[in-house]
Image (spheres, grey):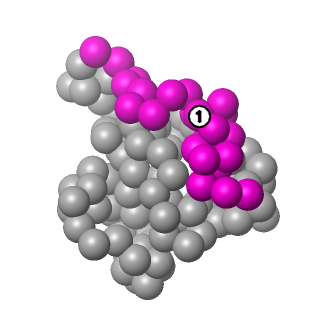
């Protein structure tokens, strides 16, 4: 699947790039205090290429994220905005950061 098709696929599942979970980050966090939320997240494919960006509630949207990975038939990485938005992102750096607070990986076989 080419990069454009990946972006379209992710958009159909998660919404348009740049999607917001709400008008107020603080209000959203207060309403969902136990959720793992990445505002201005970046979503990368298994090659480390950015394919989507926007707010993601990893807790509430776990099923959607699994659907993205299964549909693309590859692992996806979800990162917080910082430091990933403007840094030189590589697959190696993403893989090394999995499990830390700012990177999550969803495998197509998860769930």
Q: Residue shown at 52%/41% (left/top)?
A: 59
Q: Is residue 39 above or below residue 48?
A: above
For disc 1, the neighbor class at 10 Å (few under 14, some 14 to 19, many from 20) is some
Q: Is residue 41 above or below residue 47?
A: above
**As rendered, which of 28 and 1 lies closer to the eye?**
1
Q: Residue shown at 56%/73% (left/top)?
A: 47
Percent from the top left, x then y, of residue 91? 47, 78
Toward which corner of the image does residue 98 lie, by quadrant? bottom left
Residue 24 in sight: yes
Percent from the top left, x then y, of residue 9? 68, 40
Q: Is residue 81 above or below residue 12?
A: below
Which quadrant holds the C terminus? bottom right
Left or right of 74 in this view: 36: left
- The magenta stretch spans which residues? 1-23
Q: Is residue 53 above or below residue 19?
A: below
Toward the top, the furthest residue is: 23
**As rendered, which of 17 and 78 lies closer to the eye?**
17
Residue 104 in sight: no
The residue to which callout 1 is attached is 11
Q: Does the magenta-highlighted stretch encompass residue 2? A: yes
**As rendered, which of 96 and 45 lies closer to the eye?**
45
Which quadrant holds the N terminus? bottom right
> Across the whole image, how many numbered discs are drawn on residues?
1
């Amino acid at each position: 699947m080419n990069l454009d098709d990946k972006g379209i696929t992710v958009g159909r599942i998660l919404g348009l790039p740049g999607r917001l979970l709400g008008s107020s980050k603080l209000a959203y966090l207060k309403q969902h205090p136990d959720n793992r939320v990445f505002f201005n997240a970046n979503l990368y494919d298994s090659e480390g290429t950015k394919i989507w960006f926007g707010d993601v509630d990893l807790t509430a949207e776990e099923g959607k994220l699994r659907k993205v990975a299964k549909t693309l038939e590859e692992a996806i990485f979800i990162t917080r905005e910082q430091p990933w938005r403007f840094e030189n992102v590589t697959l190696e750096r993403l893989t090394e950061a999995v499990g830390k607070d700012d990177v999550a990986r969803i495998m197509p076989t998860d769930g």
